Amino acid sequence: MIQLTKAEEDIMKILWQLKRANVKAILEQLPEPKPAYNTVSTIVRILENKGVVDYKKEGKGHIYFPILKQQDYSNQSINKLVDNYFQGSFKSMVSFFMKKNDISLSELESVLKDINKTE
């Protein structure tokens, strides 16, 4: 299971959106106050060492691209959430969010219809 920090996730979100980018392009997408160029470069190299990002040399620089698919990371993160906080029960998780977010029965039925469409 791949563990990413919040900063690493922020960079990955940008790479998933852009598909390919150098450090400067990634930095431009980050909100203010922007971190230093070297900070972003270091995070990208950490992601490369974790095996979730790769690069191609282009001129004097590198163009980075994600290896880890966003859907795979999302699935892994949800499964970790369910395992760690809901004893592995998706039913418990859904029940928790229904109670905490005051979801109506009609909203739940709508969600179920969407789920059934994808099956």
Image: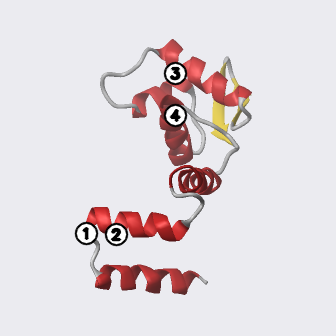
What's the distance in space between the residues labelled 4 and 2, CA to CA?
31 Å
Specify the amino acid type for callout 2.
Met
Depth check, front residue: 51 or 100: 100
Query: How would you rate the neighbour count of disc 2 (Cα within 10 Å): few for under 14, some for 14-19, many for 20 or more?
Result: some
The earlier-in-sequence mark between 3 and 4 is 4
- Do tag 1 and tag 2 residues touch (Cβ < 8 Å)? yes
- Do tag 1 and tag 3 residues touch (Cβ < 8 Å)? no
Query: How would you rate the neighbour count of disc 1 (Cα within 10 Å): few for under 14, some for 14-19, many for 20 or more?
Result: few
Specify the amino acid type for callout 3.
Val
Q: Position of residue 2 (x, y in %)?
A: 67, 40
Q: Position of residue 112 (x, y in %)?
A: 45, 83
Task: Name the residue tied to disc 3.
Answer: 40
Specify the amino acid type for callout 1.
Asp
Q: Quadrant of the C terminus?
A: bottom right
The earlier-in-sequence mark between 4 and 2 is 4
Displayed quadrant of residue 34: top left
Residue at horizontal 65 percent and vertical 54 percent from the top: 72
Q: Nearer the viewer, mark 1 or mark 3?
A: 1
Task: Name the residue tied to disc 2.
Answer: 98
Task: Name the residue tied to disc 1.
Answer: 102
Q: Secondary structure at mark 2?
A: helix
Q: Secondary structure at mark 3?
A: helix
Q: Position of residue 52 (x, y in %)?
A: 69, 38
What's the distance in space between the residues labelled 1 and 2, CA to CA?
6 Å
Task: Name the residue tied to disc 4.
Answer: 11
What's the distance in space between the residues labelled 2 and 3, CA to CA?
38 Å
- Do tag 3 and tag 4 residues touch (Cβ < 8 Å)? yes
